[in-house]
Image (tube, rainbow, N blue to C red):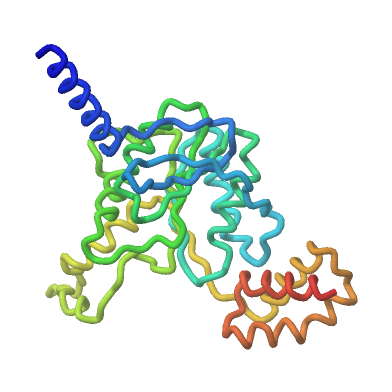
Amino acid sequence: MNEQVEQLIRRASQLLERIEAILPQPLSAPDWGASVAWRYRKRASGHGVLEPVRHVATIRLTDLKEIDGQKEKIQRNTLQFVRGQPANNVLLTGARGTGKSSLVKACLNEYSSEGLRLIEIDKTDMVDLPDIVEVVASRPEKFLVFCDDLSFDEGEPGYKALKSILDGSVAAATPNVLIYATSNRRHLMPEYMKENLSYKHTDDGEVHPGEAVEEKISLSERFGLWVSFYPFSQDEYLAIVAQWLSAFGVGAPAIEAARPEALVWALERASRSGRVAYQFARDYAGRL
């Protein structure tokens, strides 16, 4: 009888171990000395982990041309944050390929020696933002929680979680965490023509948005700093091409000779963005 009881206890213990293995676990702190940047990832089991980025992008602020106004705002806000002064969460919006995410990466490289760190998170994992903030809250470093190409469709759970973290939770904001996000949508959610019908006009001429519009605006308004990016002119595009070719070691005569090819390259892609300029420079410098 005793042997049967012991066997039953062992089987029950094994079953409990298997159940515990698949249950969600609290987010654990990584080795903070392994990198200056981490990615938040969900395992198949549902466990979230912070994975160190072994090869951080080496782009510098001096590499970014024709966005001096945007660069000044982001750099100033980031420097205030690193030095423990008041700073804002940032939403970078506008044309694709104009340097939004590159600017955030460049700020990390500029100020990592002063304690700046970055955690990249996908919009689908925004529901876990409170857990990430909890893990880093007691650290001496300053953390940018960065979401690239952020946008939401109706009813996505991450939308509410982000609103709460930005400005709306009963908990006080953590002084060593800021949210930096890039998006091609100014209000982060799709906008429809039918929503214009919900606007209300008062007798004195004032215009008030309806509830659906208010809900969409409310998230983007919680970012304290908005920075807008615009498509480049032809001259700006060529200046960026020249800068990247120079960075790849191409001489001035070859840079001048590359201008017609650079324009054809942009025409074929129907875009004069910084990304297209960088891609052309890599191709041209590689051929040389």
Is residue 118 positioned above or below 67 on the image?
Answer: above
Which image quadrant for residue 117? top right
Task: Identify which residue is drawn at 58% across, 49% down.
Answer: 75
Task: Identify which residue is drawn at 25% across, 52% down.
Answer: 160
Side of 269 relative to 258 (left or right): left
- Residue 184's spot in the image, x, y percent? 43, 68
Side of 199 relative to 250 (left or right): left
- Residue 281's spot in the image, x, y percent? 74, 72
**Which part of the image, by quadrant, shows the C terminus?**
bottom right
Is residue 19 positioned above or below 93 on the image?
Answer: above
Task: Identify which residue is drawn at 58% across, 39% down.
Answer: 36
Which image quadrant for residue 208? bottom left
- Residue 215's spot in the image, x, y percent? 22, 61
**Which part of the image, by quadrant, shows the N terminus?**
top left
Viewer-side residue, 43 vs 258:
43
Task: Identify which residue is drawn at 49% across, 65% down.
Answer: 228
For the image, the number of numbered tags is 0
Side of 6 relative to 95 (left or right): left
Viewer-side residue, 138 vs 186:
138
Viewer-side residue, 173 vs 24:
24
Is residue 80 positioned above or below 245 on the image?
Answer: above
